[in-house]
Amino acid sequence: MKISPIMSNSYNNVSFSSCARIVKNKSGSIIYRNTTTFFRNDLDWNSLCMYIKDKYKNANKVNLVCYACSDGSEPMSLAMLIKENFGNDFQKFFPIVAKDVDDVIIRRAKSCFVNMDIEDIRTINNYTNNNIRNYFKFPRKALGIEFIPALINPWFKKGINYSVADIKKDCSNIPSDNTLLFFRNVWPYLADDSERMKLIKKIKSQFSKNCAIVIGNFDNKNISTHNLLLDAGLKESGLLKNVYELG
């Protein structure tokens, strides 16, 4: 999820614009605007797949947890990546846990539909060997529509559990073993480096065996989240950027 710069840290009297996913305060000022895409290109998804295969090859159960999941495009991307590349072994990664502080976005994610554009469709086909219709159904008269309402196939929808949660309060619910935690492109939302470091230490203390956290380019570009993770004693993955493990 990509978010514009924060204008307020107050979530009191927030209203939601469903079309553009713009969050405003009571006076009408924008608090944040979030947009999301399938297989967002600040992560090397093919390398991520190799990383997961190597890191969790001996695990019987793997916990894929995605905070700030927005409308579900990222956890669905991850679910498709797993389904396409892990054969019968894919079940040990499901269900993916997806959470967001925005109850409106979570209601949307729980719905039977997801909006996608032509670029989303092209990208999904690229990562699924043109197998997009195994995951989504499309209306017959979709040409010329800017955002196409794609129906999520029921079997695929069952692979992701959505709920409302704030990672700062929900950190203790992150599984301690064999967990790959996605918390991407939202670190600038936290008030300051002190709050960010406090959260990083909570996450680190929650991790026990074979765990890692995945962040985004937006995090590094705006507040150097990677430096905070390194300062807290996490280390960069050797296979791909934006992934940090216990030292």
Image: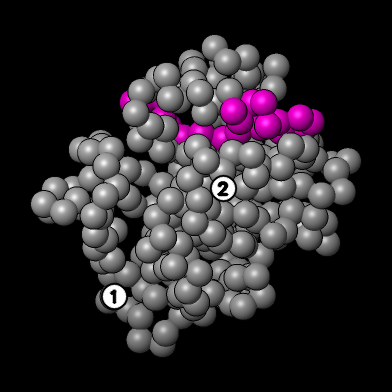
Which disc number belongs to residue 145? 1
Q: In which quarter of the image is residue 19?
A: bottom left
The colour scheme used here is one colour
Q: Which of 80 and 176 is in front in this view?
A: 176
User: Mark 2 — residue?
Assistant: 66
Q: In which quarter of the image is residue 185?
A: top left
Q: Is residue 119 visible?
A: yes
Which disc number belongs to residue 53? none
* Relative to 132, residue 53 above or below: above
CA neighbours of label 1 inside 10 A, class few (<14), some (14 to 19), many (20+)? few
CA neighbours of label 2 inside 10 A, class few (<14), some (14 to 19), many (20+)? many
* Relative to 154, residue 196 above or below: above
Please check the rendered image and state whether residue 247 is part of the magenta-colored stretch, yes or no.
no
Q: Position of residue 138 (x, y in %)?
A: 46, 80
Which range of residues does the magenta coloring cover? Answer: 202-222
Q: What's the amino acid at mark 1?
A: Ile
Residue farthest top in this picture? 231
Q: Position of residue 69 (x, y in %)?
A: 48, 52
* Relative to 157, residue 182 above or below: above
Q: Which circle's residue, 1 or 2, is located before the other in the chain?
A: 2
